[in-house]
Image (tube, rainbow, N blue to C red):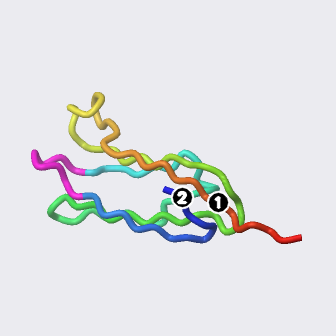
Amino acid sequence: MCVRPGTVVSLLLSPRTDGKRWTAVRSSAPALVLVTGRQVAADGTAHVSLRAAGTRGGSAEITVSAKEPDLAGTGGVGFTLAVTVTPYAREG
């Protein structure tokens, strides 16, 4: 996903059909893309808010872990989002 600086992105992650729950959200570059909110509803749906840095450009990987051990061992990554922040072009 490519966004402009200062953009806020909301993710809605439904639980898997076999009842797996989302447990943690991490950014590989929190100075570039910061996880500003995370809430898991009673039905297992995760609501995640991400905010891109105000002026910087670059890339970050957002990973969301699942509780169940069938995903890459105990508490493995169940969702990954690649985010690229592209600054506005500067004139002159």
Which numbered circle lies on residue 28?
none
Amino acid type at image mark 1: Thr
Residue at image coords 26%, 34%:
71
* Mark 2 surroundings: few (<14), some (14-19) or many (≥20) residues within 10 A: few
Give me the disc on residue 86. Answer: 1
Q: Residue at x 37, y 50 (%)?
A: 24
Kind of residue at disc 2? Cys
Instruction: Read off the magenta span.
Output: 14-21
Q: Position of residue 23 (x, y in %)?
A: 31, 50
The quarter holding residue 84 reads bottom right
- Identified at 34% across, 44% down, the residue is 65
Answer whether labels 2 and 1 touch (C-beta < 8 Å). yes
Which residue lies under the disc numbered 2? Answer: 2
Query: Label 1: few (<14), some or many (≥20) within 10 Å?
Result: some
Is 21 on the left-hand or right-hand side of 49?
left
Which badge, 2 or 1, comes first in the chain's sequence? Answer: 2
**Residue 91 at x, y percent in the picture:** 83, 71
Does dot 1 land on a helix, a strand or a loop?
A: loop
> Vertical placement of 15 versus 87: above or below?
above
How many tags in the picture?
2
Report the front residue among 14 and 73: 14
Q: Quadrant of residue 54?
A: bottom right
